[in-house]
């Protein structure tokens, strides 16, 4: 069981470039999440999904898009990267909401110059 | 909006002493309160959680208490060890207006040998 995996681990982008972060889980979880982690601000929810084909906005969705075409995968897209999107991005998954442990991926460190 | 406040932001203790981290939440409808530990460069991992129908839960050296009336919950670590050094995040799951889990900003715990 690999759990939750993320690719890539590191990435440097120039302002205006686009990229997609991939999250995959092999635990058959319905729920998947994308967070960003910035110093002193904890984990902030960007977008989440309650099942294949569904997505919803979290606390800080602006500048990001997501897709969940397959149950095991959750993609996070940055269409036009900005320096303010420099952060560590974590994907997570869980069986359900409000009472279920979230399992996190190893993170992606993104720098936008 | 909903928020979770966590204190202190940094905590330094001597090995063997106890450490206490406190969180308050705003939404009285919250009913699930997990604590995650994040070691340097690693992913967050669940260490203990508590539900709103329970006042206290203990697991070896760690315990969590919940005061629903005051809307605060605390993490207690006894007999601290150097390997307890990490960032600890509290969180609260809200059910009003859809699913949300809000994380506190984190507490960096240093255990000095």
Image: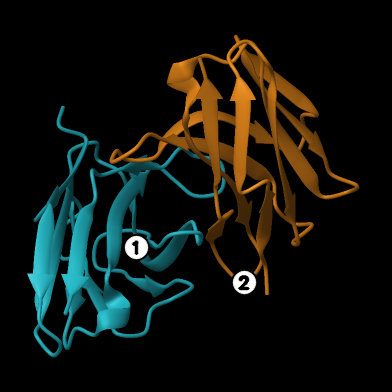
Chain colours: A cyan, B orange
Q: Nearer the viewer, residue B104 or A77?
A: B104
Q: Residues within 10 Å of mark 1 (few under 14, many from 20)?
A: many
Residue A26, image x and y in percent? 18, 38
Q: Is residue B104 above or below residue A57?
A: above
Q: Is residue A102 above or below residue B96?
A: above
Residue A51, image x and y in percent? 31, 58
Residue A27, image x and y in percent? 24, 36
Question: The residue tagged with tag 1: helix, strand or loop?
Answer: strand
Q: Is residue A15 left or right of residue B36?
A: left
Q: Nearer the viewer, residue A112 or B103?
A: A112
The answer to whether residue A75 is seen in the rendering is no
User: What residue appears at the point 60 percent right and 9 percent down from the top-left corner?
Assistant: B60
Q: Which mark is residue B97?
A: 2
Question: The residue tagged with tag 2: helix, strand or loop?
Answer: loop
User: What residue appears at the point 66 percent right and 32 percent down from the top-left corner?
Assistant: B50
Count the marks: how many?
Answer: 2
For residue A33, which quarter of the picture?
Answer: bottom left
The answer to whether residue B4 is seen in the rendering is yes
User: What residue appears at the point 37 percent right and 64 percent down from the top-left corner?
Assistant: A48
For residue B73, which quarter of the picture?
Answer: top right
Q: Residues within 10 Å of mark 2 (few under 14, many from 20)?
A: few
Q: Which mark is residue A12?
A: none
Q: Is residue A94 left or right of residue A71?
A: right
For residue B58, which quarter of the picture?
Answer: top right
Residue A28, image x and y in percent? 24, 40
The disc numbered 1 marks a residue on which chain? A
Q: Which mark is residue A49?
A: 1
Q: Is residue B108 above or below residue A12?
A: above
Image quadrant in which the N terminus of chain B is located: bottom right
Q: Nearer the viewer, residue B76 or A19?
A: B76
User: What residue appears at the point 46 percent right and 37 percent down from the top-left corner?
Assistant: A101
Give the CA separation, mark 2 to mark 1. 15 Å
């Amino acid at each position: 069981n690999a759990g939750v995996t993320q690719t890539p681990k590191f990435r440097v982008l120039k302002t205006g470039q686009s990229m997609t972060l991939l999250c995959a889980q092999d635990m058959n979880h319905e729920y998947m999440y994308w967070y960003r982690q910035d110093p002193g601000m904890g984990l902030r929810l960007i977008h989440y999904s309650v099942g294949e084909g569904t997505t919803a906005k979290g606390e800080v969705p602006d500048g990001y898009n997501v897709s969940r075409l397959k149950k095991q995968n959750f993609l996070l897209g940055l269409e036009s990267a900005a320096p303010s999107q420099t952060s560590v991005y974590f994907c997570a998954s869980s069986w359900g909401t409000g009472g279920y442990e979230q399992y996190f991926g190893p993170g992606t460190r993104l720098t936008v110059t | 909006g909903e928020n979770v406040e966590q204190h202190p932001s940094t905590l330094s203790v001597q090995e063997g002493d106890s450490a206490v981290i406190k969180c308050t939440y705003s939404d009285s409808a919250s009913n699930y309160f997990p604590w995650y530990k994040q070691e340097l460069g690693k992913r967050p991992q669940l260490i203990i959680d508590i539900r709103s129908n329970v006042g206290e839960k203990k697991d070896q050296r760690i315990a969590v208490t919940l005061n629903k009336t005051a809307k605060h919950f605390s993490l207690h670590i006894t007999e601290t060890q150097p390997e307890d050094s990490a960032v600890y995040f509290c969180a609260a799951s809200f059910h009003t207006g859809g699913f949300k889990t809000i994380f506190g900003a984190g507490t960096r715990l240093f255990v000095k040998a």
